[in-house]
Amino acid sequence: MRPVLLMALMLLGALALADSPTRAKQHYQLHCMGCHGEDGAGLEGQVPSLRGTLSRISQGELGRDYVLRVPGVTQSSLSSEELAAVLNWAIREFSDAEAAETTRPFTATEVATARTRPLLEIGPTRARVLSEAR
Amino acid sequence: MQQFDSLVERLSRSLAKTTSRRSVIRKLGVLLVGTASLPLLPVARGQAVVKEEGDPATCEYWRYCAIDGFLCACCGGSVTTCPPGTEPAPVTWVGTCRNASDGNDYIVSYNDCCGKSSCGRCLCNRNEGDRPIYRPQQANDLNWCIGSKANIPYHCTVSRIVGVVEKKR
């Protein structure tokens, strides 16, 4: 492969990577921010906060399954790829660096599999997931 | 080393000849106060200024492309601030509007202002991007004052820019 072509491909790859968080943030603003708020703090007693809790819940399998089956995910018009990117962006944005580092990123396949089974008992499931994530 | 010593000595002596101790203290004071005062200057620290045209008190104003409600700009508030006696609902509906002045699409958050009865002035119902109510995140027919910490009565709606949609490459 010619060096110029290789460099162009590398630059394109870098641009695509750089673009991803911006796109994920826009999707968050358009599809999630209305309820969860600009800072992810939610609304006490009504809309769950994402700050710190999203990364904590997403450490274990039960929590990950819960996150991918809440109404905001199952009813979203975003694709599974876009949803995975938004969730991974939100984990980085609304958690401390250590928690974000230790949380396994969501994949599109994981999202696609779980989102087809919407949760019916959301409140009790969240309470159980949170108590187990402590 | 000796050359360095003599250089420093010459510089120190020349500084001592041209300045007094008081002037040094004065200059240091100005520097300290100036540095501390800099953040207090009236500089806009919110969103960047958006080049735009139009009257925020009319439904045709570009930011209202997806609004359904009374304009706070006609009700004692402004395009981004709730009128006195009301407070913004924390839950909002978010859409995008194109600004003809710069050709960009902006992400606009429509916050209902709650706490007083309906304003009744400048009712606008533009529905670009509006979806049926069973998609609540993308429907503008909902009264977001209900269930918020603010009192239930809906008064008017503000339109706040929260971002610019990045153009696809």
Image (spheres, coloured by chain):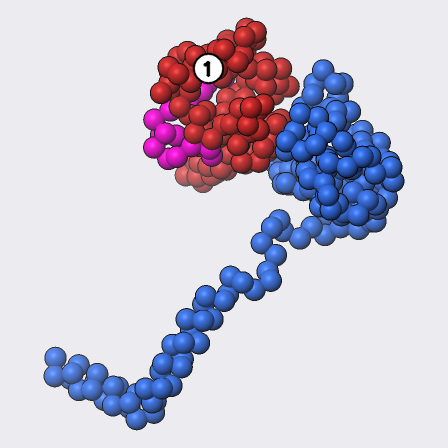
Chain colours: A red, B blue
Residue A2 seen: no
On screen, residue B122 versus residue B99, left or right, reads: right
Horizontal and vertical percent for residue A67? 49, 17
Residue at left 82%, top 44%? B75
Residue at left 26%, top 86%? B11
Horizontal and vertical percent for residue A21? 51, 34
Asked where in the image residue A7 lies, by quadrant, the reply is: top left
Residue at left 72%, top 35%? B114
> What residue did someone put label 1 on?
A127
Q: Quadrant of the C terminus of chain A?
A: top left
Q: Secondary structure at mark 1?
A: helix
Residue B143 seen: yes
Amino acid residing under circle 1: Ala
On screen, residue A112 versus residue B11, left or right, reads: right
Q: Nearer the viewer, residue A79 or B19?
A: B19
Report in which chain the residue with disc 1 lies.
A
Horizontal and vertical percent for residue B9? 20, 86
Residue at left 63%, top 51%? B48
Looking at the image, is B124 positioned above or below residue B23? above
The magenta stretch spans residue A105: yes
On screen, residue B108 versus residue A83, left or right, reads: right
The magenta stretch spans residue B148: no
Q: Nearer the viewer, residue B86 or B101?
A: B86
Q: What's the magenta region?
A: A93-110
Looking at the image, is B17 positioned above or below residue B39? below
Asked where in the image residue B161 lies, by quadrant, the reply is: top right
On screen, residue B57 versus residue B13, left or right, reads: right
Horizontal and vertical percent for residue B140? 75, 27
Q: Quadrant of the N terminus of chain A?
A: top left
- In this view, the residue farthest toward the bottom is B17
